[in-house]
Image (cartoon, rainbow, N blue to C red):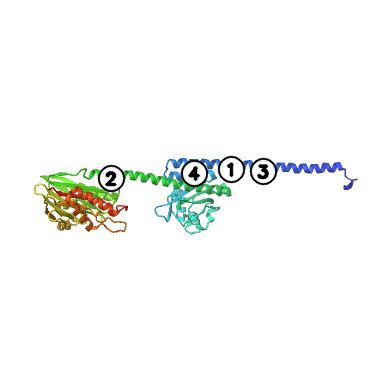
Amino acid sequence: MLNPPEMLDPVTIALGVGAVVLIVLVLALRNQRRRNRSIRRRFRELEGEEQRMFSFLNDLGLAIENEPSASVLSRIIVDGIDKVVNARGGAVYFFGSENGFLNPSYISENCPPLIGIPVEIRKKAQRDPRALESHVRLSRVGVDEGILGHCLTLGQAIHVADVKSHPSFRDAFTRYTDDVAALLSPLSHAGKDLGVLVVARRHQDGAFTANDFAVFRSAAEQSSFAIGNARVHREAHEKRAIEGELQNAREVQRILLPQADPVVAGFRISGTNLPARIISGDYYDYLDLGDRKFGIAIADVSGKGVPAGLLMAMCRSALRSVARGQTSPSEVLAAVNRQLFPDIREDMFISMAYAILDETNGKLVIARAGHDPALLFRRESGKVELLRSPGLALGIDEGTVFERVTKDQEIALFPGDCVLLYTDGVREAVDSHDEEFGMERMSESFRLAAPLGSEAVLARMQEELRQFTGEGPQMDDITLVAIEKKR
């Protein structure tokens, strides 16, 4: 017969309680061990993730130092972040030349499709799997299309747990059917949007965690900084290279201009060229024509920079190829026009003046192809005249009209007389109030300097231009050639 509870032996009760406590302690210990193992495992995972992140940032830093191309840097970023968050693959899309579209810079090999696939492409891919990959790698994406466009619109990193269920893929013609999760972030630097970074996992690989998303956002921020800086470095390198090439071109152009003023019996001739940019569209030249005749040319190519410089070089070559043996400047200009016309763009032309100086009789014959009229100072009267021979600019007409309207003008020069050839950069120079130097100032400056000789004309003209324009930039090329009949 059992004893009632109140009759239990105290020892028995104590043993029972002890057993219960022991069981609870054992279970608690097991749970703690499991938690400890989980914590250690998670610590190892975080430690590995941290190590992968450090490795990624180190690779990124080394890559930037080597100034990689956009595609190489994109590969380093995508493959690096894939490893950090254990993604299946990823891609970088950059804005193209048309800002309304994103173009793929790099898509990793095993990356699931991240854009909608047209129905006809899916049907074609059933016959040829390469059709799908080709479409994904070659397709540009509108900035308002799919999850990429959605990310750009939000302007922040997003976690899309199920891509096929995203509202942006509810188009009957462009579908998304894969079971994929994605992390996306816009890329920007210095306030400028660059593109979108995205990594993805298939659902069978497990979902992205909140920690994965946080790490991805941090890596995306570092990637934006790296891409932006790489672009700055690349643009600076390209600019240095272009500047070096332009300096080389300027040196070539400098060699094409006269290296010294010519020696012509009975005359002093002085010339100078002051380019507004590295490459000048102005040109002047001296040509020994034989038989005691001397050619003097000045020209101004429409536009500035490299195109104008190249056309100037063509003009010089054409002039030198036809000038020798010719006594009519207008016929020389006609021959130059016939050579250049087929190769001059419709929006370009050359104004030019060409003169032939005869040592034997002191006469100057000049023709103008649409160029500003030369200035003639007569020592006897102390006045300045304009030499207005008619003419059409080079490159406007293939020859018929040009040769009909372009005529020679003959001038007899007497001791102390002086002729000034110039380009429109002189009279069109502006001061701080946008007032032009103008024809009147130029004529007066020439009138005062001409009695002192050709070199004085150039020196005074340049000094007055400097005083007039002040600290303002030179807006156009300036070229001057002064021809003085010795007294």
Q: Earlier in the sequence, mark 3 or mark 4?
A: 3
Are dots 3 and 4 in contact, CB under 8 Å? no
SS assignment at label 1: helix
Q: Is residue 130 visible?
A: no
- Looking at numbered disc 1 in the image, what kind of residue is underneath it? Leu
The local crowd at label 2, few if under 14, some if 14 to 19, many if 20 or more residues have their Cα within 10 Å, is: some
N-terminal-most mark, 1 or 2: 1
Specify whether 116 is left or right of 325: right
Left or right placement of residue 198 versus residue 245 in this view = right
Earlier in the chain: of badge 4 and badge 2, it is 4
Query: Label 4 to label 2, Cα distance in Å?
Result: 45 Å
According to the image, label 3 marks what residue? 35
In this rendered view, identify the residue nearer to me: 379 or 361: 379
Which mark lies nearer to you, 4 or 2? 2
Q: Position of residue 179 (x, y in %)?
A: 54, 51
**Between 342 and 276, the one nearer to me in the picture:** 276
Whether residue 358 appears in this view of the structure is yes
Q: CA distance from mark 1 to mark 2?
A: 59 Å
Question: Which residue is rendered at x = 39% and y = 47% of the image?
Answer: 235
User: Upstream in the sequence, badge 3 or badge 2?
Assistant: 3
Instruction: Give the residue type at disc 2.
Output: Arg
Residue 371 position, x and y percent, is: 20, 55
Q: Which residue is mark 1?
A: 46
Q: Quadrant of residue 390?
A: bottom left
Q: Report which residue position mark 2 lands on.
A: 250
**Marks 4 and 1: CB-CB under 8 Å?**
no
- In-front residue for pair 462/77: 462
Q: Residues within 10 Å of mark 3 (few under 14, many from 20)?
A: few
**Residue 79 badge:** 4
Which residue lies at the image location 56% right of the left edge and 42% below the top edge?
Answer: 50
Quarter of the figure that contains the N terminus: top right
Q: Amino acid at mark 4?
A: Asp
